[in-house]
Each structure stands twice: as structure tokens, then as C-alpha cells.
């Protein structure tokens, strides 16, 4: 998908808006357009901020305008201009990004945002005063943390009320390729009693490694110890630990939280602490053919984990899993995973589960959030990977993620299945898109909303959580409710992967009721949505043939400047 060739009108508009910006400001020094080795169109320029010159490139992704262009240092990959930047040489984190992108925003507006950011950072001594989108999720922050301690709500409640300054006990250690995860098992307390974390299954003591653990209440005002072995053991002596067990896990309680360390003979390792909030109310196929199929699953939560593992059980042999989230205890009421995977990224855990039920399966994982706060460059690469799958499954229940998956489906002419579970588990919806048969996913979504409007019922959107509250009662979607919708979506997926002709499903959208309510008359009331089986085409370009030819000349001239006299193809 080369947008500046396929959408000549938009390319012309982008150039005109940049030209207008150049004529109206004195901080922008233009250079030229070029095409890089990945066929992306770039515009090079210099930003003039005070006495400083910032060489920048405005890089348009090949999927523009589905995803935003980015502004990044030109040439030097070690350049670090801003605290709001994706690493040295990386793109600037601007006011507009993948999580709030709208297709009508132009590259010129991204340049203005970059100028505001760099100007403000040089005016404010404290860059935290600058409004920023540079916020990350728990999963993003834990990407590079290898050793982790899960401080469960049960443990934190116990630790805050422990009377002694020091307690000895055990922690369980789950070892994974990408992480070491500890959680407290039990501690000896007064009168020969033992506290045990009842929120963790007891059999984990047998499934995990058992590590000696010391829980210490740090005196008020004490500074955290240095992590050299000698200094750390000196600090423990100061606290009265005395002869500590070999290689213990040390938990230091502070007024503002918990610090964790693992002591070895020649090193002290800082362990990242994960302390989630206690959230209430979250309670006859050809297997040989399927083995060669690749399925991209966006979202490895309750629905996505079940669909992925179900497809693996049916013999699907290749998976691309996308999710940035961690599995936390409150997720267990509905997810395919279990306590052995707590505090790991869901994509890693679902990947392991897939290979447990289908050892021959090949799994690629991406700890990224589609439509969330991610670097645009990595998002572009991700969309390209997704577009190469044989089937895309959207289980993210996120409109931004849906838009990016639409771009991937369009770029690769890839079938797509998506599923939603209604709040409270009252029912759900499954839908499929097959290129050349159904309209595009975006047009199908519009058709579904129109169908609901014709029936006089508001569209029932999936909720981030599966609770639905009113004044009298709280409805909670149970695992069985989610499993029903996930199972139907998996059957849709298998029908596409098996290339059945005709399909066993006469319609491509179904609303499936699991309880009386909304427009469902009773449990298991199923309502198909009848959409025209026609592939929707893009509206014709408003440019005449002469103007279109002129636009192609512009593209060809940029190609010649970028690649010399070599064949531009």
C-alpha cells in the first residue's frame, strides 16, 4: 500500500499545507522530499529554535492516513532532544499520536506540534510542566524488567498490619524465558502461627521454586541501601538481620510502598514490584492445511485467549499475538490462563499455552497496544506484519485497534473476524469480513449501526469491563458467557481458514443473546444482520487525468532524487 501513489489527492494536499506553513513561519527551513528504502515518503527540513538548529525528517508511514506521520531526528540515531522522545534518535512524542490520531490531521500540524514541544522544553526548567501524551501502561513499563515481585492485595494487607519489624518466610519463584516472577507464599508470625497468601493457589508451592524471604520494616528516614553486595549486607546488619539465609529475597517495607532485592554471593539484583489495585466485581477439519495457516490475534484477554487456544487445539499452526497487558489476579475469572502466568505479559502466556496444546505451533508475540500510546514507527511495522496473516482476529474491543486492523486487512486483502461481549454478559456479536465478498470491515461496522438504528435500538457497545450496573442489580459476564461468544468467533475463523465453499454460515454478522434484555426476547435468541455481499470500492478520485499525471511526475522526480537514475520500480 503506497498511499502517495494510490491517493494522489491527499499527497497533493499534504504538500500544499506544508508549503503554506513554510510561508507563514520563520522557524522552518525546508530541504526536500525523498523516498527511503522502505518506500516511505519523507520530508526533510530544519527546525530553528532560538540559536539551535534541529535537523528533522517528517516520515509518512506507508499506511497513511490510517496512522500518523512522525517527526524524528534526521541522520544521527544517537540524538536525544527531548524528555518526550522514544529513546535516542527516536521519534518525538507529540500532542497527536496513534491513540488520538484522526485521518484529517496533516503533516504540517505534526511539524507545528514538534516546534511547540522543543520550544517549551527550552523555556521550562522543569520539563514535567509540559503537557504530554508520554504516558505508559503497566505492561509497557515492565517490558525490560526481568525480575518482578507481585505484591498481591492480600500480601499488602498483611504486610501493612504485621506487628514485628522482621519476619522470615518463603516466596514462590516462577521462571520464564522472559521473566522471573516472585510472590509471597507464607511467613512465620507470633505464637507459632503462619500467614499464607490465600489469594494464590497453594499448589504453586509445588509448581514453583521456593525461595527464602525476609520481610523487613524499614525505619523511618532510612535511605534505601546501595546494591553492592558489601554495602547491602552492611545495611542488613544495621537492621539486625544477622546471619541471613543464602540468596534470600529481601522485602523492605516503606511508607510509600515496597522495595524488593535478591541477594546473591557476588551481586544484589533489584526486583521490580508490581502492586495491582484490588478491583471489586471482577470476578472435521483438515489439520494438515490448518498447520500452515497464520492467524493474527489482537487482544489476548478473555475473548482473545480463548479464541487463540481453541484455534491451536483445532490445528492452526502459526500465530501472531498482539497485546501489551499483564495478567493480574482479577483477570482469572474469565481468561484462558491461570496463576502460573501471573504478572507475565498475556501474549507470552497465551503463546506458552498454545504450545502446550499444540507443541508444533509457531508463535510470534508483540507486546504492543494497537491504538494505544506506542511509537508510530513500530506501529507501522506491526500493521505490515498483521497484513501478511491468513486471518486477522480482533478481540481487543477497542475502536482505535479496529481502525488499524482495518488498515492491515485492506493492505493484505486479509479476512477478518471480530467479536464483542456486551456488558453484563447479556450477549454478544460476531462478524467476519472476506475480501471480495463482504464490504470492508469499516463499512460493515457502519452497516451494523444502521441496522440497529432501523430497529430503533441503540448500538450495544462492548465495555472495557464486563460489569453492567443499574440501581437495583449488578450483572457480571461470567466465563461461560465470554466462552460462548469466543467459541462462535472461533467457528467463524475455522470456516474461513478451512476455505469452505459455500460457507456453513449464511450470514456474516450475528447478535447472540444469552439473557433476556435489550432486543433479545430470551436466552439464545440469535439475530443475523443481513448485509449486502458486495465489496465496497473507494470513491473515485476528484482529480482529472491531467492533474493526476502531474502528480505522478512529482512522485517520479522524488524517486529519481532518492535513488538516482536507477529504475524507480
Image (cartoon, grey):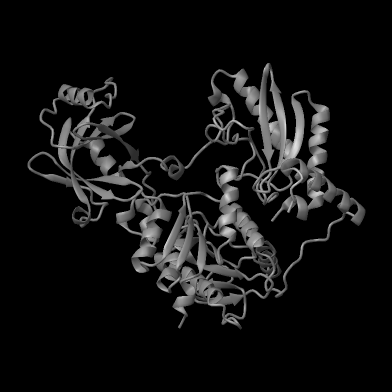
Q: Which of 87/84 is in front?
A: 87
In the rendered image, the quadrant that contains the C terminus is bottom right
Q: Which of the 4 image quadrants contains residue 228?
A: top left
- Residue pushed farthest front? 565
Q: Which of the 4 image quadrants contains residue 164?
A: top left
Q: Is residue 283 visible?
A: no
Q: Name the side, left or right, on which 239 lies relative to 156.
A: left
Judge whether 193 appears above or below 322 on screen.
above
In the rendered image, the quadrant that contains the N terminus is bottom right
Percent coordinates x, y for residue 113 in the rendering: 68, 32
Q: Name the side, left or right, on which 115 lies relative to 364.
A: right
Residue beneath the point at 14% across and 28% down: 241
Q: Is residue 123 visible?
A: yes
Percent coordinates x, y for residue 143 in the rendering: 42, 43
Q: Name the side, left or right, on which 138 lies relative to 554.
A: left
Q: Which of the 4 image quadrants contains residue 48?
A: top right
Marks counted in the figure total 0
Q: Which of 2/450 is in front?
A: 2
- Residue pushed farthest top? 51
Percent coordinates x, y for residue 227 in the rendering: 27, 27
Judge whether 438 appears above or below 387 on screen.
below
Q: Which of 211/398 is in front?
A: 211
Residue beneath the point at 83% across and 39% down: 16
Residue beneath the point at 47% across and 62% down: 319
Amino acid at each position: 500500500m503506497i498511499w502517495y501513489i494510490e491517493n494522489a489527492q491527499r499527497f497533493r494536499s499534504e504538500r500544499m499545507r506544508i508549503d503554506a506553513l513554510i510561508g507563514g513561519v520563520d522557524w522552518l527551513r525546508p530541504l526536500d522530499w525523498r523516498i527511503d528504502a522502505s518506500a516511505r515518503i519523507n520530508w526533510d527540513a530544519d527546525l530553528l529554535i532560538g540559536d539551535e538548529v534541529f535537523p528533522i525528517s517528517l516520515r509518512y508511514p506507508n499506511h497513511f492516513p490510517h496512522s500518523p506521520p512522525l517527526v524524528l531526528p534526521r541522520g544521527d540515531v544517537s540524538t536525544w532532544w527531548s524528555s518526550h522522545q522514544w529513546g535516542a534518535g527516536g521519534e518525538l512524542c507529540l500532542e497527536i499520536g496513534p491513540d488520538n490520531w484522526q485521518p484529517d490531521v496533516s503533516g504540517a500540524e505534526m511539524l507545528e506540534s514538534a516546534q511547540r514541544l522543543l520550544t517549551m522544553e527550552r523555556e521550562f526548567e522543569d520539563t514535567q510542566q509540559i503537557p504530554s501524551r508520554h504516558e505508559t501502561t503497566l505492561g509497557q513499563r515492565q517490558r525490560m524488567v526481568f525480575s518482578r515481585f507481585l505484591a498481591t492485595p492480600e500480601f499488602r494487607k498483611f504486610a501493612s498490619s504485621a506487628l514485628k519489624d522482621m519476619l522470615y518466610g518463603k516466596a514462590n519463584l516462577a521462571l520464564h524465558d522472559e521473566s522471573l516472577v516472585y510472590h509471597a507464599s507464607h511467613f512465620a508470625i507470633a505464637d507459632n502461627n503462619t500467614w499464607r497468601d490465600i489469594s494464590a493457589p497453594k499448589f504453586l508451592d509445588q509448581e514453583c521454586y521456593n525461595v527464602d524471604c525476609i520481610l523487613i520494616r524499614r525505619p523511618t528516614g532510612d535511605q534505601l541501601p546501595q546494591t553492592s553486595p558489601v554495602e547491602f549486607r552492611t545495611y542488613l546488619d544495621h537492621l539486625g538481620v544477622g546471619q541471613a539465609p543464602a540468596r534470600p529475597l529481601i522485602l523492605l517495607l516503606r511508607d510509600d510502598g515496597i522495595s524488593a532485592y535478591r541477594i546473591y554471593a557476588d551481586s544484589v539484583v533489584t526486583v521490580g514490584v508490581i502492586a495491582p489495585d484490588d478491583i471489586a466485581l471482577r470476578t472435521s477439519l483438515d489439520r494438515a492445511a490448518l498447520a500452515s495457516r497464520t492467524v493474527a490475534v489482537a487482544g489476548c484477554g478473555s475473548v482473545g485467549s480463548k479464541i487463540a487456544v481453541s484455534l491451536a487445539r483445532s490445528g492452526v499452526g502459526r500465530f501472531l499475538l498482539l497485546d501489551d497487558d499483564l495478567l493480574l489476579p482479577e483477570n482469572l475469572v474469565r481468561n484462558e490462563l491461570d496463576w502460573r502466568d501471573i504478572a507475565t505479559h498475556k501474549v507470552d502466556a497465551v503463546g506458552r499455552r498454545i504450545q502446550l496444546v499444540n507443541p508444533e505451533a509457531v508463535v510470534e508475540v508483540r507486546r504492543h497496544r494497537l491504538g494505544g500510546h506506542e511509537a508510530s514507527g513500530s506501529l507501522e511495522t506491526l500493521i505490515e506484519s498483521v497484513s501478511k496473516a491468513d486471518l486477522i482476529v480482533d478481540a481487543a474491543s477497542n475502536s482505535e485497534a479496529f481502525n488499524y486492523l482495518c488498515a492491515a486487512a485492506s493492505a493484505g486483502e486479509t479476512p477478518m473476524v471480530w467479536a464483542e461481549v456486551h456488558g453484563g454478559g447479556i450477549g454478544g456479536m460476531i462478524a467476519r469480513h472476506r475480501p471480495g465478498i463482504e464490504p470492508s470491515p469499516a463499512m460493515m461496522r457502519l452497516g451494523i449501526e444502521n441496522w440497529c438504528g432501523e430497529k430503533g435500538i441503540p448500538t450495544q457497545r462492548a465495555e472495557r469491563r464486563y460489569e453492567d450496573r443499574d440501581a437495583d442489580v449488578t450483572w457480571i459476564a461470567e466465563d461461560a458467557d465470554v466462552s460462548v461468544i469466543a467459541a462462535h468467533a472461533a467457528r467463524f475463523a475455522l470456516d474461513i481458514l478451512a476455505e469452505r465453499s459455500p460457507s456453513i454460515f449464511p450470514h456474516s454478522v450475528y447478535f447472540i443473546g444469552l439473557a433476556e434484555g435489550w432486543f433479545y426476547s430470551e436466552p439464545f435468541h440469535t439475530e443475523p444482520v443481513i448485509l449486502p455481499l458486495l465489496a465496497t470500492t473507494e470513491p473515485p478520485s476528484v482529480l482529472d487525468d491531467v492533474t493526476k499525471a502531474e502528480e505522478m511526475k512529482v512522485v517520479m522526480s522524488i524517486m529519481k532524487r532518492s535513488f538516482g537514475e536507477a529504475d524507480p520500480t
